[in-house]
Image (cartoon, rainbow, N blue to C red):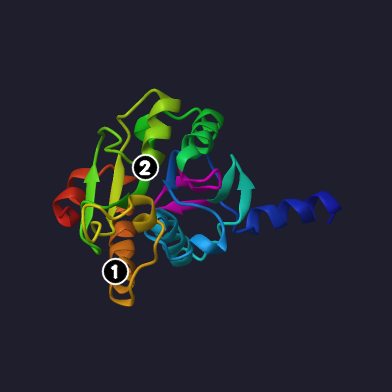
Amino acid sequence: MSIFDVFDRISQNSSAPRGKIEYIIAGLGNPGMEYDGTRHNAGFFTIDTLAEQLGEDINRLKFKGKTAEITIGSTRCLLLKPTTYMNNSGESVVQALDFYKLSADKLIVIYDDISLEPGRLRIRRKGSHGGHNGIRSIIELTGRDDFPRIKMGVGKKPHPDYDLAKWVLGKFSKEDAAKLKIAAENACECLKLMVDGKTDEAMNKFNS
């Protein structure tokens, strides 16, 4: 057996994902240990949950973010955690979309929403940024707002005068962290339906 046959056999037996990327699944948040467990990182947490379910490590640096290539059903997807910090999330997302020549309807974004109680989800096919700076960045740099998204409930401010930045950069209570864990698992089920063309089913099953 030649050395070329050996490499070919290794390649054929490799568990590395193959095929064209058909979806980009981006979870939004801020990089750095100081932001772990904060409300603003609900998107990161959900991506990590999905990667863990699939036995993947999301640690490849690409597109100004951390990435992993996965397969959901028969659909090839790129998991993406932008490391540009929340307000510049669009820089990472646009690079990935352009590289794979994908349109906005093949992008799913997961992010925190203060209008939903912890543990609740809301799936939307499109919409405005609603004051969320990460979504604002994506809309501004893609020129599109017609991409599906999953909103992760993190709860509203304790009172109207409470500083919003302080709230979203604060950490979950033990009780709310447990609710987020369940919500992230549900969001993973949503994603499996959405990339299979069953967004309506996901909305009917999980929307709060």
**Residue 116 place in picture, x, y as percent:** 21, 55
**Residue 206 place in picture, x, y as percent:** 19, 56
For label 1, count other residues whose C-alpha is less than 10 Å away and answer few (under 14), some (14-19) or many (20+): some
| Quadrant position of residue 185 | bottom left
Q: Quadrant of the N terminus?
A: bottom right
Q: Where residue 169 is drawn, which disc sits there?
A: none
Foreground pick, 116 / 108: 116
Foreground pick, 172 / 103: 172
Secondary structure at badge 1 equals: helix
Foreground pick, 193 / 130: 130
Figure check: 132 above or below 54: above
View extreme (bottom): residue: 174
Q: Where residue 182 is drawn, which disc sits there?
A: 1
Figure check: 175 above or below 23: below
The residue at 43%/48% (across/down) is: 28
Amino acid under label 1? Ile
View extreme (right): residue: 2
Figure check: 26 above or below 44: above
**Do the numbered discs 1 and 2 sit on residues whose CB atoms are within 8 Å?**
no
Q: Is residue 122 left or right of residue 47?
A: left
The residue at 28%/63% (across/down) is: 183
**Residue 171 place in picture, x, y as percent:** 39, 66
179 magenta-colored: no
**Residue 44 place in picture, x, y as percent:** 45, 56
Q: For the stretch drawn in magenta, what is the main secondary structure?
A: strand
In the picture of the structure, the residue carrying the numbered disc 2 is 108
79 magenta-colored: yes
Q: Quadrant of the C terminus?
A: bottom left
Amino acid under label 2? Ile
Query: What segment is highlighted magenta in the picture?
Result: 69-86
